[in-house]
Amino acid sequence: MTIQKEIYAQFNKDKIIYSFTLKNKRGVEVKILNFGGIITSIKTPDKKGYIENITLGYDSPQQYIDDNSYLGAIIGRYGNRIANGKFILEDISYTLAKNNPPNHLHGGLMGFNKKIWKASSKINKDSVTLTLNYISKDMEEGFPGNLITTVSYSLTSDNSLEIVYEAKTDKKTIVNLTNHAYFNLSGNFNSDILDHHLQINGNKMLPVDEFLIPTGDMDLVENTPFDFRTFKPIGKDIYANNKQLKLGLGYDHCWCLNNSDQGVRKVASAYHKKSGRLLEVFSDQPGVQFYSGNHLSGDYQKRTGFCLETQHYPNSPNQKKFPSVVLCPGEIYSSKTFYKFLIQ
């Protein structure tokens, strides 16, 4: 197990972006920046032993600075959408940036994905860990409380990338952290991901309105294009005559994951037959946002990557029926998501 650190970009003596390369002995390599905690690449072998990158990334620092697709980044303080950029906490109304009009999205104009985090590393016998720390000041992007956030990335000897999120606050606030990696298990980013087979352990999903805000209902996926309870190609139903697919221009919805009271469990899997690569996702979160890359453009074309963002439900601060995202002083926000890379 090894970890290497190098300067990725330097703007002045106080603003340095580092790249960390985590490697194990099985040929898996993960590169992560301390800028936004961005995963810039994940290299894994296919069934023939050929090692390729399977996550979308950019070639230059400026592309990450300008990026609005959140490639590989830590998302916070609140992942996903908050309706009309507003929520009420303890009878106080908070106003956030409407950076996805008319809604707030992924932490705002300068969310966690645009911050330089303090970094430290540790090598153990069966894992190597990169730990990132960031203090989000009270009212940064409109959120209350000084939030001390720690995100740890661990590459293990059995080909898992484990992400642990922790946070604490000095004032009641809301928190919903995730990672926005885009996967293409083929290793060929010129090809779309519609031939990937996907499975999601969720019997229900959250229907959305025309602004992609959950209506508050939880619909059964049975007999709908959203039924991924068993493996099926992503492209099988993506063009179906379905109102929800039309609203999202494809899949851009949150699934209500089964057994949410059981902690970390397998919540989703993706398989690419030609390469033999199998991705298994484990998490303790109640939901996963499956996004089929419908708005990718420029460096990457539409649907050349997919996201499985483990998280709480979108717009939870404004939906009393949804699991709470409130964090109080004295409590510790903790969330775990593991990506396991296999060959089948």
Image (cartoon, rainbow, N blue to C red):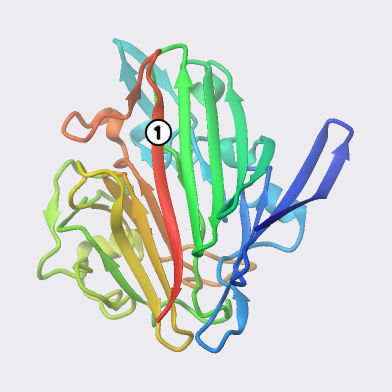
Q: Amino acid at mark 1?
A: Ser
Q: Is 281 situated left or right of 131 in this image?
A: left
Instruction: Choose between 280 and 289: the one closer to the eye.
Output: 280
Residue underneath mark 1: 334
Where residue 298 sits, quadrant-wise, is bottom right
Looking at the image, which residue is at 57% across and 53% down?
127
Looking at the image, which residue is at 50% across and 86% down?
47
- Vertical arrangement, residue 63 with respect to residue 322, above or below: below
Looking at the image, which residue is at 60% across and 24% down?
135
Residue 8 percent across, percent down from the top left:
80, 51
Label 1: few (<14), some or many (≥20) within 10 Å?
some
- Vertical arrangement, residue 77 with respect to residue 338, above or below: above
Looking at the image, which residue is at 68% across and 43% down?
34
Residue 202 percent across, percent down from the top left:
20, 58
> Would residue 70 be visible to someone looking at this image?
no
- Vertical arrangement, residue 231 with respect to residue 245, above or below: below
Q: Residue furthest right?
A: 13
Residue 328 percent across, percent down from the top left:
36, 16
Q: Residue furthest front?
A: 125
